[in-house]
Image: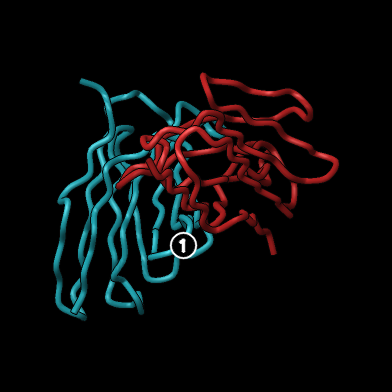
Amino acid sequence: EDKVVQSPLSLVVHEGDTVTLNCSYEVTNFRSLLWYKQEKKAPTFLFMLTSSGIEKKSGRLSSILDKKELFSILNITATQTGDSAVYLCAVYRVDSGGGADGLTFGKGTHLIIQP
Amino acid sequence: DGGITQSPKYLFRKEGQNVTLSCEQNLNHDAMYWYRQDPGQGLRLIYYSQIVNDFQKGDIAEGYSVSREKKESFPLTVTSAQKNPTAFYLCASSPGQGDEQYFGPGTRLTVT
């Protein structure tokens, strides 16, 4: 059975700290891995990773994929209270037609940034 | 103003009734998806559609049905056969299969 496991499930840090969120996966026919931020309702897209070892970066957020060890990390530096959210990791599989089906999500990491 | 809309925001139904959740997008995306989210859980895939007039079951399709008669619309019906329908339902779309997905604001369904 395909699975995506995120750790930790919750994390509380102080403003200014650096955090690392983890995502490991066991998925048949892996295609790509995506990170989302969910604050109240709709998840918002952060990164899509398809190639191993290539870091994606956006401001204080960065992410990297290791396809050999089957995991990804999401780093947030100089955290701010606005970074408080649930961070979701998700994986696309290659479907029987060679395309992609829907995303398989992990349970998320609930990140709380204290002032 | 492009985006994905879901209606209604909150929905209350009695057990045994079917209910249809609306999802519309004006992003000209080919692919659309329905997910369910329960407290403390990630999203789980119900159905997805990569093209008009075609759709596939996801991981938890039992008790649900969909249609894709128009590119911009992908309604989800929660039938009385769904044993635990109370949940937060999210619709998403992507330009094509395997692309990043954009989510609507969600519908919170409560069945009593």
| Chain drawn cyan in the picture | B
Q: Residue at x 34, y 54 (%)?
A: B66
Tell me where residue A2 appears, x and y as whole percent.
68, 59
**Residue at coordinates 69% horizontally, 23% vertically from top-left?**
A55
- The image quadrant of residue B6 is top left
Number of on-image labels: 1
Residue where numbered disc 1 is placed: B41
Q: Which quadrant holds residue B46?
A: bottom left
For residue B53, say whether it is visible. no
Q: From the top left corner, tell me how far across and down residue A42 is, in percent.
A: 33, 42
Picture coordinates of residue B101, whole percent (x, y):
45, 35
Q: Is residue A114 above or below residue A56?
A: below
* Left or right of B87, for residue A28: right
Figure quadrant of the C terminus of chain B: bottom left
Number of residues whose C-alpha sits closer than 10 Å to that of mark 1, classed few (under 14), some (14–19) or many (20 or more)? few
| Residue A32 visible at all | yes
For the N terminus of chain B, give its image quadrant: top left
- Residue A56 placement (x, y as % from top left): 63, 23
Residue depicted at x 80% and y 39%? A67
Chain on which label 1 sits:
B
Chain with red colouring? A
Residue type at mark 1 is Gln
